[in-house]
Amino acid sequence: MRALVSSLAAGVLFGFGLGLSQMIDPARITGFLDVFGAWDPTLMFVLGGAVGTTALTFRLVLRRAKPVCEPEFLVPKRTSVDRRLVTGSALFGIGWGLTGYCPGPGITGLVLGSTNALFFVAAFAIGLIVSDKFIGEPAAEKKSEDG
């Protein structure tokens, strides 16, 4: 229960930050990507704040024996760049550029009643289901989980 409450609190804080910084407005995102037109640099400041905070705190947090609300840290074990990572990143970026939404702002926009966010979140969910059904996990990850 404690993990659920802390996850909800973190999600609400994240959503509030997205709303406060206006990163739920797709025009902000497409404006940032329009480097040869009416470029809007505000996303750079939000990303810089996030990366800076993570760079300063990530190693400190991982020095703990375990997280406060979970039995262990869930840190990815794979560090290689492969075709799946590059393809998935490209699809994510294309979708973000076309719609101005990524999952966080999409869900925040959905909570705020945005019709466009509703369509984005529905398409995102369908993409997750199709990906899981037809692509699944890489064989190497399945082996490591099975032991």
Image (cartoon, grey):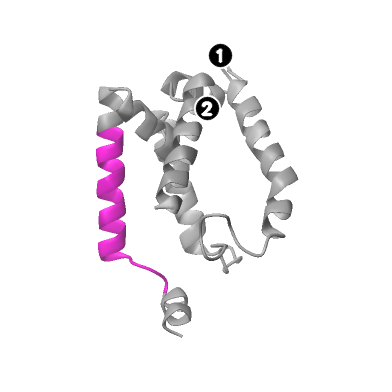
Dot 2 crowding, Cα within 10 Å, few <14, some 14–19, many 20+:
some
Disc 1 secondary structure class:
loop
Side (left or right) of 144 relative to 50: left
SS state under label 2? helix
Residue drawn at x 44%, y 25% is 24
Q: Which residues are magenta?
A: 119-138
Q: Earlier in the sequence, mark 2 or mark 1?
A: 2
At label 2, which amino acid type do we have? Gly
Name the kind of residue labelled 1 in the image. Answer: Ala
Q: Position of residue 122 (x, y in %)?
A: 25, 39
The furthest residue to the front: 2
* Foreground pick, 45 / 84: 45
In front here: 35 or 57?
57
Label 1 environment density (alpha carbons within 10 Å; few <14, some 14–19, many ≥20): few
Q: Vertically, is 138 above or below 15?
A: below
Residue 98: within the magenta?
A: no
Q: Residue 98, relative to residue 39: is it above or below? A: below
- Magenta span: predominant SS is helix
Cα distance in 3D space between marks 2 and 1: 24 Å
State the residue position of label 1. 38
Residue at the spot 31% in from the left edge and 58% down from the top edge = 131
Residue sitting at x 27%, y 41%: 123
For disc 2, the marked residue is: 17
Report x, y in % for residue 133: 25, 63
